[in-house]
Amino acid sequence: MSFTEEIKRRRTFGIISHPDAGKTTLTEKLLLFGGAIQEAGAVKNNKIKKGATSDFMEIERQRGISVATSVLAFNYKNKKINILDTPGHKDFAEDTFRTLTAVDSVIVVIDVAKGVEEQTEKLVEVCRMRNIPMIVFINKLDREGKDAFDLMDEVEKKLKLRVTPLSFPIGMGYDFQGIYNLWEKNINLFSGDSRKNIEDTIAFSDINNPELDKIVGEKAAIKLREELELIEEVYPPFSREEYLEGDLQPVFFGSALNNFGVRELLDCFIEIAPSPRPKHSDTRLVEPTEQKMSGFVFKIHANMDPKHRDRLAFIKIVSGTFERNKPYAHVRLNKNLKFSSPNAFFAEKKEIVDISYPGDIVGLHDTGNFKIGDTLTEGEEMNFKGIPSFSPEHFRYINNADPMKAKQLEKGIDQLMDEGVAQLFTLEMNNRKIIGTVGALQYEVIQYRLEHEYGAKCSYENFPAHKACWIKPLDPKSEEFAEFRRIKQKFLAHDKYGQLVFLADSEFTIQMTQSKFPNVKMFFTSEME
Ligand code: GDP
């Protein structure tokens, strides 16, 4: 297969949802179609369970699972599909945001009864801002839920999407009879027996065919015809261009648990979803078809063995081929690195590969060279954009609780921050360290890992900040900026790249500061855009 054919057949995507909507179940069913797993239950549920016996045990268990499910790859109908795992738990939202920088499209899973939930809103917003193509899958149709039209309204309003259904349910819950597939123009019947028979579809190019009445009953047939008419009047026709631009989101209905509507989703997905897309670096747009390799780190996972501090850095290949034992330039460190055992992922296993293509994720063993966002090239000096840090929501001083272990603590904090577990800010005034996180759970993770992996002890103390604002003065030499620095002295810090950050204690302070110092620009992500 040629290089361009290899690129064209790749589909790298993420599934996003609020916890419990059915992401894990859907992932598992998708893998079944690829023949990648044999039985149900193979995809471990990567979420923090409420009321687990011990939070630490749970965190460890979760870390073990999340390395296994970070990338799930399989072949289906000659397409190479890479699913990137995105934790649904809100305390790990940052991990999900970063993973979204490495996907070319997403599938959004929504629970038919619960509708659009909080976490879905946040994640979809990130995708919308980046114009990532999205397909919506409304799940659990075997249960009583909201009316299909009401749900699509809700999706449009709450998620600010423009949708068009490509499949439509016939009944729901107890009366659920099946799905009309507008994309393939056929009906897939849901019945006791056909739950398992995934091939059981009936072609229906003409919905007015009286056969329909016999199959689903007259009442349901009339209702379906009316609904399809309404769909045609109300919703825009599907356009792949609009979908790829992020301007139109097709909707599918089904039941992941019953493997119903999943094949339809997958078959449409492989047709319409984009192959690896070009990506902006700080100097230019990089096309996947370029011969020279380039890629970036979007995730770092510490090894499960606490005695060996090696880690796995996950790289998304943007262009060219990534080859084993070939030297690549680590742009930030300005040095060449070779990798003798790059890992590729297949289903839930990882194995060493000689060559990987754009769209693929490669896992590289790392002893501390990589930070999230690092770029690898064949020598070109450029850095991929789009891996910003978002402002944390919690801030605490971190103190050394064992004076004999100051070095270990420092090293531990440094490495955990490189992994992206949390963000470190150093106060300008006194060099005290502040850890910022998205969820309170991260503080436990950090404390536990510092102790078990680095032999260091820490304690926390509240720091009264509400948001981190990255600061860029229009004129660094101005009086105004000097005055800003003087007044806000106590709240100024540096992030791990040395950028100036103002740790504001409230929205009100942010507004006041903005109006008082209009030429000192504030940004709420580290990319300052
Ligand atoms: P995740 O948190 O989004 O990964 O959700 P899971 O895949 O773990 O599913 C959450 C719960 O919903 C589990 O108990 C599943 O068995 C159940 N579930 C998933 N899909 C369906 C479905 O189509 N119908 C029904 N009735 N339950 C489902």
Image (spheres, rainbow, N blue to C red):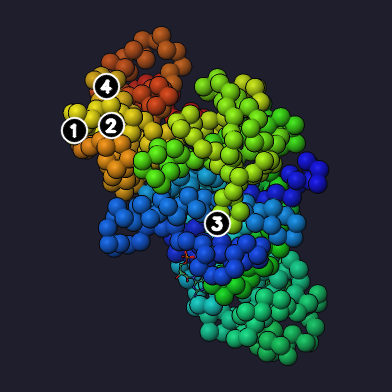
Residue under the point 37% across and 49% down: 91
Q: Contact (CB < 8 A) between labels 1 and 3? A: no
For the residues labelled 1 and 3, the Cα–Cα distance comes to 40 Å
Specify which label sits upstream in the sequence, 3 or 4.
Answer: 3
Amino acid type at circle 2 is Leu
Rendering coords of residue 347 (x, y %): 59, 57
Q: Which residue is mark 4?
A: 431
For the residues labelled 1 and 4, the Cα–Cα distance comes to 18 Å
- Quadrant housing residue 338: top right
- The secondary structure type at the circle numbered 4 is loop
User: Between residues 42 and 246, which one lies in front from this camera angle?
Assistant: 42
Amino acid type at circle 3 is Glu
Rendering coords of residue 459 (x, y %): 20, 38
Residue 409: mark: 2
Q: Which residue is mark 1?
A: 402
Specify which label sits upstream in the sequence, 2 or 4.
Answer: 2
Instruction: Check the image and report above or below for 519 versus 36.
Output: above
One can see residue 462 in this view: no
Q: Nearer the viewer, mark 1 or mark 4?
A: 1
- The secondary structure type at the circle numbered 3 is loop
User: Between residues 199 and 475, which one lies in front from this camera angle?
Assistant: 199
Rendering coords of residue 260 (x, y %): 61, 73
Amino acid type at circle 4 is Asn
For the residues labelled 3 and 2, the Cα–Cα distance comes to 34 Å
Specify which label sits upstream in the sequence, 1 or 4.
Answer: 1
Q: Which residue is mark 3?
A: 348
For label 2, the crowd category at 10 Å Cα-Cα, with few meaning under 14, some 14 to 19 and many 20 or more, is many
